[in-house]
Image (cartoon, rainbow, N blue to C red):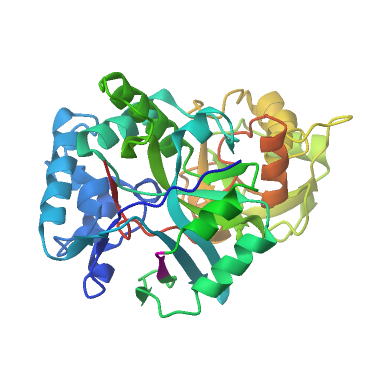
Amino acid sequence: MAHLHPFKAWRPTPRDVEEIACVPYDVINVDEARTLAEGKPNSFLHVIRPEIDLPEDTDPYNDAVYEKGAENLTQLLSKDILQQEDEACIYIYRLIWKGRKQTGIFSCVSVQDYDNEVILKHELTRPTKEDDRTRHILTQQAHAEPVMITFKDDESTQKLIDEAVKEDPLYDFAASDGVTHKLWKVEETAPFEKAFEDIPKLYIADGHHRCKSASRAAAEERQNNDNHTGSEEYNFFPAVVFPMSDMHIMAYNRVVHSVPEGFLDQLNEKFDLRAGADPEPSSKGDLSIYIDGQWYGTTLPIADNPNSVEKLDVHRLQEFLLDPLLGITDPRRDKNISFVGGIRGTQELEQLVDGGKVDMAVSMYPTSIEELINVSDEGLLMPPKSTWFEPKLRSGLLVHTF
């Protein structure tokens, strides 16, 4: 069974929430973070992207970055613009984007559940990013950002959510990207905790490195605590847990920096391309390729008797095109391939090719939430950059310190 762990969150005053709350650390680069935080000394970007307050040539893994993040968090918590709850609570968090609502439970979840595979993953994590996030957690003595988790729809849990949102929210604001964020506090947490005892598995949607880093940080804290009991706050980390029917996945597209001369002819010979295709594929198994100033459509082959990973379009692209035709055997490390989130649109793919920055772009059909669940349940792993979730959670709404 899964465990929800109410916590004494630090949260902005309603007056200051719009200035403090920010986009997650991993959807923007340092230059974008500097621009977004300009003129906003209380933006949570100073905590999750503390390198913006250091010289531009600072190594992102320099000790000074982690120390600056801890300093910025301490300063922010010392101001009267944030307050800590007197009692442990959970929250209901709703995002509204383009007329679509996504509502989940903002709570802490258990490191033990992650370690014991009650919380299932579907991606590999990279040691460098693990090390980075773990150092931030340990230096700040806090989990500054939540992960996004999903679960199979449950009627009793949904009734509790629906009842909670009948009250007035703590926060209700529209961010600059057009996403409306609403948050409700739930003080009577026992019904939610009880409901989750009947939920056998949780599934990581977005935030694999933060989950793994929370586990590593807890292990280090445990090792340094002779009186460890398992109830310490470092054994839990914040997450927003959504019913899977609420989740929205966009495509995660690919661009190839260099292709051989005459590659379009090679593609046409193998895949029977259709010229003038729509930039966005309309069904699973189809993809659109932009090369030499034009869109081409095709249908991907599929392996015989495929497992849940081999059915994925991103796997089929890798198996039948990227590896055999371009020698891209490890897309995690190959510098000839990059990834473009679907939120940026196919126009960006065209601009990258037409501007000479890349030779070819591939527009994918989105992976479904059902495919993600199937892969996780089978204990398999997706190729890198298989899913792009929108809308993104806002950072700085609720902070978990330990």
Instruction: List the single residue furthest toward the right.
Output: 304
Above or below 97: residue 226? above
Q: Position of residue 38 (x, y in %)?
A: 17, 61
Q: Position of residue 199 (x, y in %)?
A: 64, 47
The front one of 39 and 47 is 47
The front one of 251 and 347 is 251
Above or below 389: residue 223? above
Q: Which quadrant of the rendered structure holds the C terminus? A: top left
Q: Which quadrant of the rendered structure holds the N terminus? A: top right
Above or below 329: residue 383? below
The front one of 3 and 111 is 3
Residue 91: quadrant of the picture: bottom left
Above or below 322: residue 56? below
Q: Is residue 367 magenta?
A: no
Residue 376: quadrant of the picture: top right
Main SS, magenta residues? strand
Q: Which residues are magenta?
A: 183-187
Is 57 left, or right, of 120 in this rendering?
A: left
Name which residue lies at 80% across and 31% down. Answer: 307
Name which residue lies at 35% across and 73% down. Answer: 171
The front one of 235 and 272 is 235
Name which residue lies at 26% across and 60% down. Answer: 85
Q: Position of residue 132 (x, y in %)?
A: 31, 31
